[in-house]
Image: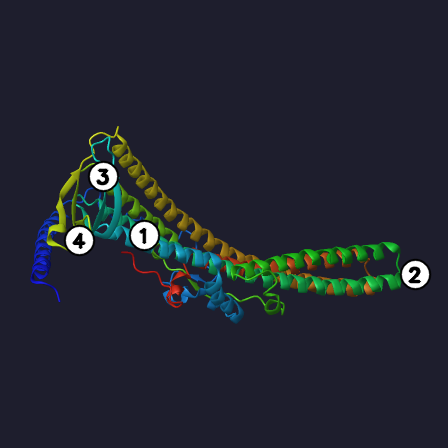
Amino acid sequence: MRSNSQGSQMDQMAYGAMGVMRRLGVVLAMGTLLAGCVTVGPDYHAPKVKSPKAWHAQLGEGLTKTRVDSRQLAHWWTVLGDPELTHLESRAVQDNLDFKQALARVREARAALGIEKAGLYPALDSGGQAVKQRGSENAGMAGEGRLYNLGFDAGWEIDIFGGVRRSIEAAAAELGAMHDDLADVLVSLEAEVARNYVEVRTFQARLAAARANLAAQQKSYDLNLSRFKSGLIDQLAVDQSLQLLESTRALIPALKTGLAQAKNRLAMLLGRSPGSLDAELDPERPLPMPPVTVAVGIPADMLRRRPDVRRAERELAAQTARIGVAKAELYPKLRLTGSIGLESVSTGNLWQWASRTYRIGPGFSWPIFHAGAIRRNIDVQTERQKQALLGYEKAVLAAQVDTENALVAYAKAQRRRDALARAEAAARRTLDLAEDQYKAGLIDYTTVLDAQRTLESLQDGLAQSRGEVVLDLVRLYKALGGGWSSMAVKGKAPAKHP
């Protein structure tokens, strides 16, 4: 049971603490009124983009200016109708290491924004210590003693000229840029998965054609060898057929190497070790078929979708805000500080009213002379903003060029494929006729040899051309900014820009 004197002391301490807190509250309220009065530096306004109303490339071969279906563009690979490709795309988003790194950068930027926002609020710390000390006799402070203290310290730098708010603005824009960087990584990832998958199927088609030609040429060589042994032909035809046979055989190792490399690249995109996808990719499947029509919309829509353009715009916004952060350093800084606590030379007296201690009041600092460093920093940030603006304009231009090139390439690749298909059919008929005439003794083997070489070359070229059509379609969807909005389906959609 405490004594009346002790109770009185505790009541006095509580009353005194309340008084200090009231004073501190008044000062904080004044600081709140002062904060937000001025925000130095330029306010950001998104640059206006001058985009053409229509594509320069002539649309054809299934390309239409119909507005792009955003849902279809989010999962553009599904138009190819290949379940294996769709499965690989889904796994890549879950396991790709570059995507995980980009996601970590978004989290880092979000945390950095939280740090900047903390600058708007007062900081409160608590602490205490128990010290045994001895003074110097030669300094007139002889003697030993102990000191105990316990209390709270508070500090608040009032954002009068908006330096903290500009830093928050820059951090928020940087977070938006990281979101768009994540989207850009996803766009590239999905395109790379599709590209390598198409290359796997293309190499398989080329290998199948090479093996079929090898089997046919083996029969021709065996026939010529048999006829040579029978004295019906000379050594020249045998050697010519052997030369073509071995040349075709020499192509197969290079094609197998290309196939293995494409599989390994695909495995790496899925965060897997080399060879881990061989079992599911070894069964040969036909190349995915591009759709009959492809909607490409208009250039303005493309620019709004492209994550690299969006990222460049957010980086420009962040750098504009940093000019304000630099300019705020020219002006005074007002800081409110306060502390309340107990201090005594003994623990027995620490909780008495007489042990109270407090300090509260404003303080300010104002840079007077820094040899022009502050203004030079403003110049630095201003020039960086100009660079960011140029970077944004370059991103817009690069996006337009990228898409125009993809449009042209896709249309021309289809025409080349169709021409090669007609040439391959004619070459096949030519070889059939040449072999019939050779067996009838109407022509020499040179004509058959030329027909076989031509057919082999056209079959390999046709297989590559068919793959190139699909690859150009992949490049077109990537250029249009397709794929990144699929993050919403994965539960990783980027937040809207603050």
The answer for how far apart the CA atoms under marks 1 and 3 are is 50 Å
Q: Please name the amino acid that badge 1 sits on.
A: Ala
Q: Are marks 1 and 3 in contact (CB under 8 Å)?
A: no
Q: Please name the amino acid that badge 2 sits on.
A: Gly
Identify the mark at residue 350; answer none if there is no mark: 4
Residue located beneath label 3 in the image: 143
- Residue 454 visible from this viewpoint: no
The answer for how far apart the CA atoms under marks 2 and 4 are is 123 Å
* Dot in front, 1 or 3: 3
Say which element carries label 4.
loop
Say which element carries label 3.
strand
Identify the mark at residue 395; answer none if there is no mark: none
Pick the front one: 89 or 452: 89
Q: Are marks 2 and 4 in contact (CB under 8 Å)?
A: no
The first of marks 4 and 3 along the sequence is 3
The answer for how far apart the CA atoms under marks 4 and 3 are is 21 Å
* Dot in front, 2 or 4: 4
Identify the mark at residue 231; answer none if there is no mark: 2
Q: Are marks 4 and 1 in contact (CB under 8 Å)?
A: no
